[in-house]
Image (cartoon, rainbow, N blue to C red):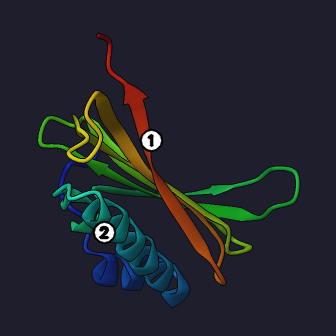
Amino acid sequence: MSTAPVNMDAEAKVVGIETSFVRRVERIQAQLRQITDKANVVVRGFEEPFTELEKRIDPYDSSFTQYGFWRGRNGELLGSVQIHQNGQVYAEYDVGCVHPGKPGWFIESATVWGNDERLTGELQCLKMPD
């Protein structure tokens, strides 16, 4: 397992990742930023280069999904992105803090999903025990 950050531009040249992958990642990152900014939560790790990239081929229809992973200094998974060949995307990034605008709630993560036309996202919140 590689723990060195992956430069998407350099990686794209090396492994032939489509330019559309980089554009989709940038849109996902912007959506994650919008979600966390709206909640007044400062989380910026998802703006860093991926620690790992992996391309998986579906054995049934031979379509591919490109995965990107953000990991911490000790190798812990902080977030991931899945970009399917058809343009569908899903991303999740750990936030792990008390919600500043909703007392009694904990923000577990920020998630984004959608396609090339529309991305949607939200915070995944849990009610804290009394």
Q: Which residue is mark 1?
A: 124
Question: Which amino acid is tagged 1?
Answer: Gln
Mark seen at residue 70: none
Image coordinates of residue 74 in percent, x first then y, are 14, 35
From what the image shows, is residue 73 above or below residue 42? above
The quadrant holding residue 5 is bottom left
Q: Which image quarter holds the C terminus? A: top left
SS type, badge 1: strand
Q: Mark 2 packing: few (<14 Cα in 10 Å), some, or many (20+)?
A: some
Question: Which amino acid is tagged 2?
Answer: Arg
Residue pictured at 76% horizontal, 53% vertical: 58
Residue pictured at 77% horizontal, 64% vertical: 63
In the image, is 66 to the left or to the right of 13? right
List the single residue furthest toward the right: 60
Residue 64 or 113: which is nearer the viewer? 113
The answer to whether mark 1 and mark 2 are in CB contact below 8 A is no
Image coordinates of residue 71 in percent, x first then y, are 25, 46
Q: CA distance from mark 1 to mark 2?
A: 15 Å
Q: Which residue is mark 2?
A: 33
Residue pictured at 46% horizontal, 85% vertical: 23
Q: What is the number of callouts on the image?
A: 2
In the image, is 37 to the left or to the right of 117? left
In the image, is 109 to the left or to the right of 83? left
